[in-house]
Amino acid sequence: MRLTRVLVATAATLASVVALHAQQVTFDRLQHPEKEPQNWLSYSQNLFNQRYSPLTQITPANAKNLELQWVWQSKSLEKFEATGLVVDGVLYTLQGPPAQGVYEVVALDAVTGRPFWTLEYKPLLEARPCCGRVSRGLAILGDTLYMGTIDAHLVAIDAKTGKILWDHMVEKVGEKATEKYAITHAPVVIKDKIVVGIAGGDLGVRGFIGAFDAKTGKELWRTYTIPAKGEPGNETWSGESWKTGGAGVWNSGAYDSETNLVFFGTGNPAPDWDGRERLGDNLYSDSVLALDADTGRLKWHYQFTPHDEVDYDSTQVPVLADIQWEGRPRKVMLWANRNGLAYVLDRTTGQFLLGKPFVRVTWMDGFDPKGRPIRIPGQVPTPQGSVIRPHVLGATNWAPPSFSPRTGLFYVAGWENSGTIATEGKFPGATGIPNGTPMGQATLTPNFKKEEEGFGIIRALDPHGLTRKWEFKMNDITWAGVMTTASDVLFSGGKEGYLLALDARSGDLLWKIALGGQINSGPMSYAVNGKQYVTVAAGSALFAFALK
Amino acid sequence: MRAAALCSLLVIAGTVLVGVQLFAQHNTAQDIDDGGRVFRNTCANCHGPDGDEVAGIDLGRGVFRRAKTDQDLVQIIRSGVAGTAMPASDMPVAQAEQIVAYLRSVAATKRSASGVGNLERGKTLYDGKGACGSCHRVNGIGARLGPDLSNIGQLRRAVELETSVVDPGKEILYTNRMYRVVTKDGATITGHLLNLDSFSVQMLDTKEQLRSFEKTNLRDFGFIDTSPMPSYKDRLNAEELADVVSYLVSLKGKVN
């Protein structure tokens, strides 16, 4: 067995008996998390990715009384990007492995933070993902947890014992860059399938999305994010560039049961900053794909950034919402993209309804009637470097946003920044935020920024017109996600290491605490015995807060 | 790019590129500044701020042995020289061009307007008449408010040091900007900024006290665009100025 795993039984096992005998997590439970607001069953709380907790104990009036309940410290110093799951008093989370090290997957008592079990899982040494040895979360179905790994394995774990049930190699990782497949996001559960996407687009893999049998790990369907020769869309790649064109998938998807569509965003085309050898629109890079969940067949797509040369991955989590649109109910998809634009799409048809910059954007100016962005000439990387907004790291990146059905607002964490981007086929030269931490490496460095040098933001957008309702500025950038609650409290954070509670209606600061480490994850909330908790990872530790 | 790699690269560049005039380009002042920053950060540890620290190599004269054009220099900076210790680098073309622009600007300016001074007299002036140690620190001696000068001779050219002495406000390095806060009760505190975040300011004030402020308790806060350092233009004569600059150029120690 190629796995190295250590199961750590703890004294907390006896205390766990009641919790671990709770009901299995059926797919029906995953589809209706509103019936059990005490739990957090999916990466972004529900399959619509709204990252909205129905809990109301913590309010704008009492948020100032939040205090620390417990801390769980990971051994790994990798970026802690995961959002945990909470099922009936048990919190499951994981932390990515350091070089030559192991994943830590843990089941914690959600009240005390003490571990029921710890699973250590060692990925292959050949695994060298481009941008961090991270994982953004787990999925659960029945009594089984699902984990994607940086060596492109999908692993099923017994949620009660931490033992591995099966370990399926989704794709073989090799020594070549184009063989550096990885899975870094939380899997998506759809009925009896586990759906994951493949990362590695920056290294030139050909991305794909796959569905796997939840019981056995057997692959049920696979849809490449780049069409093969003879398939529609392949003509948007010059020569043989489609074979190594990237379009990786490295963030979680959404699911709409009414249409049985699963939605995933795709990453940039490869090579990132030099499009001369991949002329064309490069479908379906930088797109959202709507796939039939049973077959993987592509139903529709929308490409946010045709022929991207700036690395505007569109791997933000799709956020689904049912809203009033021009006087009638409409099922939409909300999207704040790395390219600086926010979008409203009809999620049933893929129709472009609205697009608008949510930060300063210099690469495009408006859309044609079909929703294709109209480029500004010259705003592309050159050998000498071009100043482009947003910067290569984007206006927002992977950090999950939130939609509150109560306020009707779409909340996005990101930053205002520009950068000099040079075509070299490698990581571009960049200016902008001095001492910025590329790709969010977990360090706290003193900063001396003036506002004009760049700043982080949390912005509340009204989907109708994508107008800004309020913003909260941060001195530094942010890689933190956003969560809202049914009591209109918003939680987020940033590179400075503050966990923030804001009034979701006004953006006013309600409470803050410095956690001593950069926040690279999305906050989440749950309740046990009538007490609401909020957790967030900062540095390499997970912190839990509740009211005094 | 690793500093050592570029240093090695420029050592070779200086070795083999002699005798060719650099051609003029249309570089902006920003290009030259940026190039100087890159040069100081990545090259000056080996070549010195004037590019003449390595025996037999002088990058600051504007003449090279092998390069015929600026682009040749860019190529050498990026590609290295086969069979030598100078490796290739992944430095973008634009950045390499800025280094070349900087080197050309170095060649176009005098090393020091006041000539070569006496190092020992310079130290005496630094410690005495200049009272430089009341703000600056050298090898652990002196105040902490101003920039630590222990290795300033490694970082700055003589002409730049001379400018800083006579016109301190002409160029203030990014990290040397002074900061000022005004509390709600009207107290003004200035000092060296140590950290600035969304909610707070940490600084070393002029009394060398570590101070931390919540922004909500401040009436005003921000960078000071002027230098607190007095000009020595009328305090030192030309000979004394040359002596002080010579002393500063000699400071090539390690900053703790």
Image (cartoon, rainbow, N blue to C red):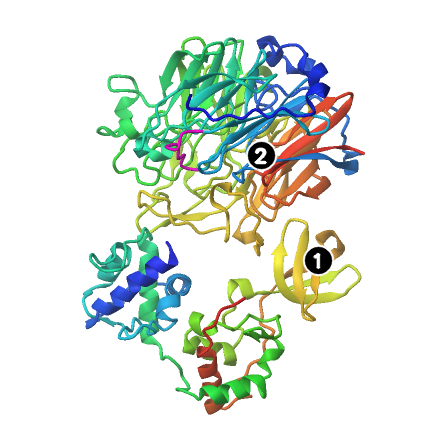
Does residue A495 show up magenta in the picture? no
The image shows residue B186, relative to residue A373, as above or below, that is: below
- Classify mark 1: helix, strand or loop: strand
Task: Name which residue lies at 57% across and 65% down.
Answer: B177
- Foreground residue among A22 and A382: A22
The image shows residue A340, relative to residue A162, as above or below, that is: below
Q: Chain of mark 2?
A: A
- Which secondary structure is most common in the magenta stretch? loop
- Foreground residue among B110 and A83: A83
The image shows residue A446, relative to residue A171, as above or below, that is: below
- Viewport quadrant of the C terminus of chain A: top right
- Viewport quadrant of the N terminus of chain A: top left
The residue indicated by pointer 1 is B212
Task: Name which residue lies at 51% across and 66% down.
Answer: B173
- Residue B113, given in percent of the width and then of the height, sits at 40, 84
- Foreground residue among A524 and A213: A213
